Image (cartoon, rainbow, N blue to C red):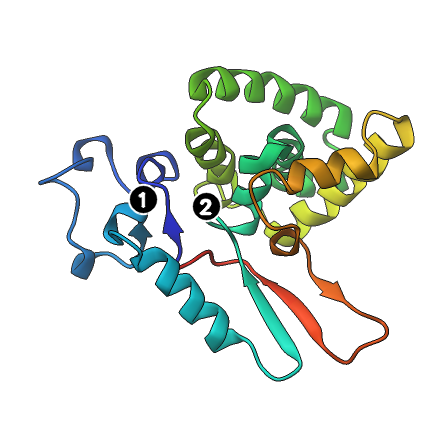
Amino acid sequence: MDVMPDTAPLIVGKLKADEIGPPCLPSKRKRKWRIKSDFPGNELDTRRAERCAKASEQNVETFVSDEWTFEYDLVFHGLGKLVYRAASLALADDRLNAGSTTQAAVLTAADANYVAVEAAAATDQERLGSHVYALFEDRGASKAIAAQYLAELLEKEIADGTLDANQLRALLSDGCSADTHQARIDPFSERRDTHCDAGAG
């Protein structure tokens, strides 16, 4: 189970508007998902450590997302627009393959929608991340397909000179461990490090 920001359940479709806040919020026993306030004090850190230890083996070390899911963390740490574009392309993948729309058309609409999302979130990164992640959680964008589109978008940004490796590394290292945001295989070692997508849940 994921552990999401307290603002996320309504945004990603877990709750209806009349279910927000106590006493309307369902008890933990009646819901499969968790929010940060379900874990007071250091309980969230303890849960994250336990999850890492459980998933890690002799030659495998697991890194759990700092905030929520992998996609959410990418948004939280500065890749919001790119992740939104990738998710939008994933949602349109069937139409793109059928030739009934184009990447340019999808991206134009995505950029316009992202401006509105960003404005609504103001400077609240948790709210922004939740709105972008709703494309996966609520609208059903495929994470695997979105990852492919995100890789293509990043490659294009780098090829165009609008983003370089140092800028990308700086974004992903802002306030979090770089190891958290990548799956690494050391060619000179049998040890494999993997990213755990499910947050601290």
Q: Which residue is mark 2?
A: 137
Classify mark 1: residues with Cα within 10 Å, few (<14), some (14-19) or many (20+).
few
Q: Does any portion of residue 102 appear in the rendered image?
A: no
User: Which mark is first along the chain, 2 or 1?
Assistant: 1
Asked if residue 12 lies left or right of residue 106, the reply is left
Q: Which residue is mark 1?
A: 14
Quadrant in which the C terminus is drawn: bottom left
Q: Is residue 1 above or below residue 106?
A: below
Q: Which mark is residue 113?
A: none
Residue at point 50%, 50% (across, down): 66
Q: Is residue 167 above or below residue 58?
A: above
Q: Amino acid at mark 1?
A: Lys
Indicate the position of residue 19 as horizontal and vertical percent values: 18, 37
Q: Is residue 160 above or below residue 77?
A: above
Q: Nearer the viewer, residue 13 or 6?
A: 6
Mark-to-mark CA distance, 1 and 2: 9 Å
Asked if residue 123 lies left or right of residue 109, the reply is left
Asked if residue 36 lies left or right of residue 83, the reply is left
Q: Does any portion of residue 175 appear in the rendered image?
A: yes
Indicate the position of residue 171 as horizontal and vertical percent values: 67, 36
Q: Secondary structure at mark 2?
A: helix
Q: Secondary structure at mark 1?
A: loop
Q: Is residue 122 above or below residue 57?
A: above
Q: Quadrant of residue 103?
A: top right
Q: Tags 1 and 2 in contact by the CB under 8 Å rule?
A: yes
